[in-house]
Image (cartoon, rainbow, N blue to C red):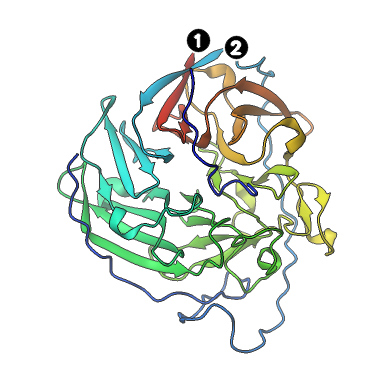
Amino acid sequence: MPRLRFLLMAILLTACIASPVATPTVQPTLAPPALTLASAPAPTSTVAPTSPPPTVTTAPPEVPSPAPPTPSPSIPGGSCCDFQLVADGLYRPTLVTHAGDERLFILEQSGQVRVVVDGQLVAAPFLDIDAIVSDRANEQGLLGLAFHPNYAENGQFFVNYTNSLGDTVIARYTVSSDPNLADPASGEILFTIDQPYVNHNGGGLAFGPDGLLYVGMGDGGSQGDPRGNGQNPYSFLGKMLRVDVETNPTQPLIWALGLRNPWRFSFDRLTGDLFIGDVGQGEWEEIDSVAASALAEPGPNFGWNIFEGTHRYSDGPADLVVPPIAEYSHAEGGCSVTGGYVYRGTALPELSGIYFFADYCSGIIWSLTPQADGAWERNVFMNTDFTISSFGEDVNGELYVVDHGGAVYRLVKQ
């Protein structure tokens, strides 16, 4: 079936009744801190430090890759499975997730959060912040959503969006007395990060097994990381940030560096291992991973812009770099990786423990199957005509695919 394709989102490197919108409470824009887990930066209105920073060691500790479970059999081309339509008629959907119950929440890039209840897309948006979201550029807009681990008790959730100045905003909202409507007046901007360009803005949000909120930040855009943000320990750009939303929600800390555009990342709901799809420059796309046991330590250097995948891109100390667990070349027909999930549902037990990811341009979905020696075997799982902007999982661990052309699908047995 033909699919509507939009201009490539900036994930590429080269590639109804709405509630009234209230302007969120605003916290100051942050200056980038040193790479440390022990202290937080003081708020300031500038991005660059005003004086030379102290010497900071950026070499990561030994970071183990996730210990693979019992190896699963290779899946022959996705012959087991098909896709079932969940919702369509959406405007540039960028994410699907759950809030700890059977409902699904879908982001529309323009600034709305839609909710699916009992298999039906509710007409009224759960949250409408279209008035304060800018999606003028393809990689900007409403990009990330994460529900608090204790959402059932406190009703809090977090969003990642682009404001009218083109900067990244992380904000917190609370649900209203109606479980299918957020309270728009509850919005509180926790922090804002300056973006020098309109691409490589990241967008992912997810709570880790440690209860911290992880924020994926791209290198800020243009090509080749001209400002060197990926390896700069004093910039929030090109990093994986962590936020303690309970004790210090306005002060993100840099955890890992060397990322180009970690558009989508996820945690294995069984093991807690982290998987990151990091969009490459012009030739290589990569999947990075960190074992749950290493999350408590200072994070790794994933290599950008010294490396693109496992391939040299510029000068720099190679001994500090943790290589990806998988990569693929643009020669295979792709151009922008979309990170996915390790399947932990019950409907397709033959897929248990296998990580799935895709390419936004080609629509190819790959599987990464853990091997006994710790390596991961990559196979084409399925060819689709989707423009895959994201994967998602429901409360039961079943896998979903978001087609940026306007629909969400669930992976089901054929």
Q: Amino acid at mark 2?
A: Ser
Rounded to the nearest whole Å, what is the CA distance between mark 2 and mark 1? Answer: 8 Å
Position of 205 with respect to 183 (left or right) is right
Q: Give the residue number, with chain letter if any, for mark 1.
A: 414
Position of 207 with respect to 237 (left or right) is left
Q: Residue at x 50, y 10 (%)?
A: 414
Residue 334 can be seen in this image:
yes
Q: Residue at x 66, y 71 (%)?
A: 233
Does 311 appear above or below 192? above
Q: What is the x, y in percent for residue 303?
A: 74, 56
Position of 347 with respect to 200 (left or right) is left
Q: Residue at x 57, y 12 (%)?
A: 80
Q: Secondary structure at mark 2?
A: loop
Q: What is the x, y in percent for residue 371?
A: 74, 28
Question: Which quarter of the picture shows residue 61?
Answer: bottom right
Q: Residue at x 70, y 50 (%)?
A: 281
Does 276 appear above or below 375? below
Q: Say if mark 2 contacts mark 1, CB within 8 Å.
A: yes
